[in-house]
Image (spheres, rainbow, N blue to C red):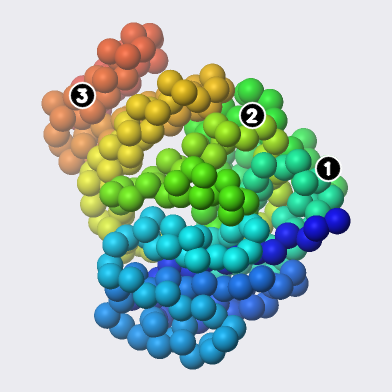
Amino acid sequence: MSLPRFSVVIPAYNAAATLARAIESVRAQTWPAHEIIVVDDGSSDASADIARGYGDAVRLIRQVNSGVAVARNAGAAAASGDWLAFLDADDWYAADRLKWHAEWIAEDPALDFLTGDYEYRDAAGKLLGTSMASHASGQMLCARASDTHRVVLDGADDIAAFVADHFGDTHTLSVPRVRFIELGGYPAGFKVCEDVHFLTRLVARSRRIGVVCASLGVYVIHTQSATRRDPVAAQRENVRTLTDLIRLAGNFPMPVRRGVEARLRAARYNLGCALAKRGDRLAAARAVLPTLLASPDWRAARDLLSMLKGAA
């Protein structure tokens, strides 16, 4: 039986304050990583020096600033492991993150990829919640999971809900390197939702997805992030990325296509809400109008009316 070898890719841009914590969380894994690859994305701080300070324990790749998607792809291209795992420099892994997936892969090689639950914490480390508990599909899967905290996602309804909710973040994803390369990795040129873009294309090529209903790591919520400082711009980018994804959805299996459509509908609604809060009634209505034109049902009409009424 072949045991999985994980290459963990950590993109870093001006991450000197948190990079060591991320690296240490990988070094502390109960299932050792095959390698740790830090991709310095044109940092102007000491990020590269911190990675270099680990010597042979960390492989450092440097590139001109090109964005997180390009950095992840560069790490994947250089990896020598047969499985890829990713970790952003301001987040960290739970101690058994790799073990949860590695042992399951060894037992069930037919799994196409794996994901799992994770915690939301603020910059001070305070627990804010968990991902699967905050999504209806995640709650249902956890209710079905056995005492092993494992559940296989393989039904049409499960898959559609998973794509729509995306309760598994990048740092909980384990994917075969060969499949990642075949799919072209993360799309460049998108500032928001590039992870959903890749994950959806991955789901479209998958039949059995392993989900661990236990926390595999921590996603840090920054109150001063660009997304929170300018929610309208963030939601516009979200819609732009998902609109590109819907362009590809005609080739997806129907459950995946339904999930993409549901996510795009939600993104347009969220953009409308952000514009409505800013007092821009007409722009809010225009944001959700494409949903009504594409799917003229009562829900789309309700969304449009809520924008007009809510911003009045």
Q: How many marks?
A: 3
Q: Earlier in the sequence, mark 2 or mark 1?
A: 1
Quadrant of residue 291 within the rendered picture:
top left
Residue name at image x 50 percent, y 81 percent: 20
Q: Residues within 10 Å of mark 1 (few under 14, many from 20)?
A: few
- Report the residue marked by disc 2: 158
Q: Amino acid at mark 1?
A: Ser
Left or right for 306, reference 283: right
Residue name at image x 55 percent, y 32 percent: 204
Tell me the mark number nearer the camera, choosing from 2 and 1.
Answer: 2
- Spatial separation of the CA atoms under disc 2 and disc 3: 31 Å
Secondary structure state at the residue bearing disc 2? helix
Quadrant of residue 97 within the rendered picture:
bottom right
Left or right for 167, reference 223: right
Q: Is residue 195 visible?
A: no
Residue 281 is tagged as: none
Residue 146 is tagged as: 1
Q: Residues within 10 Å of mark 3 (few under 14, many from 20)?
A: many
| Position of 238 relative to 268 (above/below) | below
- Spatial separation of the CA atoms under disc 3 and disc 1: 45 Å
- Report the residue marked by disc 3: 285
Residue 127 vs residue 94, the one in the foreground: 94
Quadrant of residue 270 within the rendered picture:
top left
Q: Amino acid at mark 3?
A: Ala
